[in-house]
Amino acid sequence: MLETFGHLPVAWLLFAVLAAAAFMAFYVGRTQAVGIARGYTSQLNSQPNYHGYFVAMATIAPAAIILFLYILFGESLVRAQIAGELPERIRALGDLELAQYIDRISEHATRRDALATGNALFDAASDRYTDLVGLSRIAAILLAVLAAAGGFFFGRSRLSGDFRARARVEDGIKFLLFLCAAIAVLTTIGIVASLLFEALRFFSRVNVFSFLFGTEWNAQTGADFGAIPLFFGTFLIAFLAMLVAAPIGLFSAIYLSEYASPRVRSIVKPILELLAGIPTVVYGFFALQFVAPIVRASATWINGLPFIPDGFLAAQPTSALAAGLVMGIMIIPFVSSLSDDVINAVPQTLRDGAYAMGATKSETVKQVVMPAALPGVIAALLLAVSRAIGETMIVVMAAGQRAQITPDPTADLTTITVQIVALLTGDTEFDSAKTLSAFALGFVLFIVTLIFNLIALRVVKKYREKYE
């Protein structure tokens, strides 16, 4: 039985228990409120439904806390118990080796078709791990049921004709909304803290100035950690992407908002925004199989011209230009959709005033609408730049992985995100400068994108203050 519970998805079991308890509690609370009023619900301070909602909230809240605590600490407690039961020679290993050993036990125990490995100690530990997981899940379900029962009887005891059930329910909803906002904020803080902590460990071994201003990157061997080639490749590809996305996206937004008929807009806008739903790996295949060969063939043709010196263009199979062109196509919807919303937000009175002065449609767009929408358009472009800087898959597949500084867009380059993937792929040692450099790159990338987003938000705020 313990082995069966060791493989059951306890989260779904507890969710089913909570759902059933909530429906039952709502029905009982509503029925009790009607009984208190003897059918005259107008005598109640709150409607019967709110009494039902209150009892349901009182029932599921403590059980939900049990579920949340189990998700956070259940596996950690099981791993700690297993670690304490292992022989002394295993526990004498370092923390990293012990954690890896328990990881293998956990992986083997969670596989339903796992066979005996022949190692008696390992197999016994796997069976024990499964039993402990089963016990923890049974305990979590029982505690959730007991907590739900206690909350149910507490909620029923509070019901009366004068009870302000509606106010209590609204307070509970406000707390839930606050909790969701707090989770988002805490997640951001956790991301920053994890990046910052590991980045500081890296900078304790590598000089920060040599990292930020060095021109040689060879982190795989742990020899050079100069990140300038990575910054150069990242911003060059983002620049090429914006050369495609900015004019096409902006002109598309102007056409859809100012010139297109409602029928054309209803057809073209969803098709244009469909580009945002295509997986980036598909864009990567498109760049590698279609765009990159065209870029290389074009560069080879240019090199063959009589007035062009030999080797003027690199003409590599993968290139920054191929990745930049396809990335620009990918972020067109970001520019177009945001710019379209900004242009539509320009007050119609400005257009009417321009028409009254005798301006044409194009003059109104060029001299009235676009100057008014310019701050919002700039914010849209900055957000698109942030999206381009953080793209990984297209660059991995179409730009190459050579860390170099060259103005030739047909050469293969690498970016910060590509190097992060390369450094954290495969067997990694989280105590080496090579692996820690990935966190330093991630922290720098986070700071750069954060700056772009803050600038965009500031520009949008000024725009709203001007036209609200």
Image: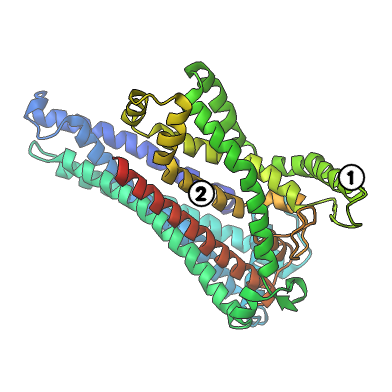
User: Nearest the camera: 435 or 390?
Assistant: 390
**Rendering coords of residue 188 (x, y %):** 45, 59
**Where 16 falls versus 31 (above or below)?**
below
Residue at 41% across, 60% down? 186
Q: Quadrant of the C terminus?
A: top left
Which residue is drawn at the image coordinates 63% and 61% (left, top)?
106
Q: Quadrant of residue 294?
A: top right
Where residue 327 appears, x then y in whole percent? 66, 45
Disc 2 target residue? 383
Q: Position of residue 66 (x, y in %)?
A: 39, 54
Q: Which residue is drawn at the image coordinates 47% and 54% (left, top)?
A: 453
Which residue of the protein is positioned furthest toward the top in this rendering? Answer: 263
Q: Quadrant of residue 26?
A: top left
- What amino acid is labelled 2 in the image? Leu
Which residue position is annotated with label 1? 301
Residue 296 located left or right of residue 227: right
| Closer to the eye: label 1 or 2 | 1
Labelled disc at residue 126: none
Q: Nearer the viewer, residue 4 or 269?
A: 269
For label 2, the SS is helix
Front residue of this view, candidates 246 and 115: 246
Q: Amino acid at mark 1?
A: Trp
Where is residue 415 drawn, in percent x and y? 68, 60
Question: In the drawing, does residue 411 fall left or right of residue 450?
Answer: right
State whether residue 378 is above or below residue 71: above
- 11 versus 108 height, above or below: above
* Residue lying at 64% horizontally and 81% vertically, measured from the top left: 206
* Viewer can see residue 281: no
Label 1 sits on a secondary structure element that is: helix
> What is the quadrant of residue 430 in the picture?
bottom right
Q: Residues within 10 Å of mark 2 (few under 14, many from 20)?
A: many
